[in-house]
Image (tube, rainbow, N blue to C red):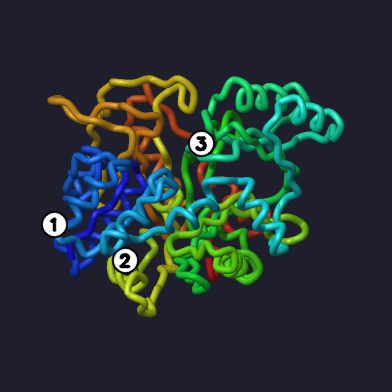
Amino acid sequence: MKILVIGSGGREHVLAKKFLESPRVAKVYCAPGNPGMVRDGIQLVDINESQQELLVEFAKKEKLDFTFVGPELPLFEGIVDVFQQAGLKVYGPNKAAAIIEGSKIFSKYLLKKYAIPTADYWAFSDFEEAVSFIGQKNQFPIVIKADGLAAGKGVVIAESYEEACFALKEMLIDEKFGKSGMKVVIEEFLVGEEFSLLAFVRGEEVYPMVIAQDHKRAYEGDKGPNTGGMGAYSPVPHIKKQVIEEAVEHIVKPTARAMVREGRSFSGILYAGLILTSNGPKVIEFNARFGDPETQVILPRLKSDFATVIYELLTDQQPIIEWEQERFHIGVVVAAKGYPQRYEKDFLIPELEWQPDENVYYAGVSSDTLGLVANGGRLFLVEVSGKTLKEAQTRVYNSLTKLDHKFMFYRTDIGDRALSYYKHTGCDKDGKEKYSGN
């Protein structure tokens, strides 16, 4: 098979590398990709992810078996519709279904209409009305979200009235997120443990993946602004099997059915960002594609042939999907200093000697004659595994200590929440408790 992956980040790097593991796959292209991917045998295509007609031409010329769409923006722009109209196999939701991520107001409407557990919410487009509501409600913290796509940065957890007003001003008046922030959702703040539950979805058919826990805040202890994600690990031992089963039965499957009933049948990766509250799991948000950095710790656990799974989903076959249950996987993002605000650029990424079982997935990099150069906020992610979470965590941070930190930073507490769970439940320091189902 020959496969095209659309996108350029760490998510697309791991997708393409996983496809290449298949004995059925001869070539994997990535458009536009990044030069770090070349090291894993991925072939770059100099076409931007929004150049739909050029991508269609390329797919026809190369007689590709299918195309996999990585990022959210081309999905929301309708690239799947364009490929399908051209008679090409493409994996991802069409434009009508991608709205589940493209509009938080729509997704909240859907959840409420079909009684799927989520936080209470209120939608506004007028700054004065939103500020007046915040003042009357006078409950903090409170969550403020840009309605549209904002690369994971359009969420503010306001701890005070002043913070809430500032966030609303940035979105509704200063247009920090452009059209995406011209409407906002204000939500009640939910307390609990967050986790990511992704699934392959085809209409009303749902094939859940193993779960992961992402770390959105920039700094240790979940401090600082929201980012696109600073690290993740899988499995998540403090989220029990019965919780995951409840989330699949009462959230993911009902959402798939609801989208069919709304005339927006979803086929692709449905990402449910969930929180385990005292009243059970609830939805924080939906994405219409793989998450980054969750993909970098979930896909290494996939034992089935990834290319075969996607091909069978595209051709109305029943895929057999098996997951590794023996090891812990952890991924830590290395970002440019200043991210997610103004950050350092154009510095050389140091070349390091990585172990054969240490995976490096590149994102915000370009290249020059000297090597890879920083040109984005999140530069790369290092993923390793271990028999225990503690072993995996120790290994990844031992490797990262070799980095010159002058222009870069990373969180040093990825995985600590699970290790704290082990400590408080009386497990040994290496976290050797048996886990199941996630």
In-front residue for pair 201/113: 113
In-front residue for pair 19/181: 181
Q: Residue placed at 67% from the left, 53% from the top?
A: 109
Q: Position of residue 371 (x, y in %)?
A: 18, 29
Query: In which quadrant of the rendered image does the N terminus lie?
Result: bottom left
Separation of marks 3 and 2 at Cα, in angstroms? 29 Å
Q: Which residue is mark 1?
A: 62
Is residue 435 in view?
Answer: no
Q: Which residue is mark 3?
A: 150
Q: Which residue is mark 2?
A: 306
The relative height of residue 225 versus residue 2 in the rendered view (above or below) is above
Q: Position of residue 400 (x, y in %)?
A: 37, 36
Which mark is first along the chain, 2 or 1? Answer: 1
Separation of marks 1 and 2 at Cα, in angstroms? 21 Å
- Numbered disc in front, either 1 or 2: 1
- Numbered disc in front, either 1 or 3: 1
Q: Position of residue 12 (x, y in %)?
A: 32, 48
Q: Residue placed at 64% from the left, 33% from the top?
A: 156
- Give the class, few, some or many, for how many residues have Cα within 10 Å of label 1's Cα (few <14, many ≥20): few
Amino acid on which the number 2 mark rests in the picture: Phe
Separation of marks 1 and 3 at Cα, in angstroms? 33 Å
Question: Do residues under tags 1 and 2 come within 8 Å of each other at their CB atoms?
Answer: no
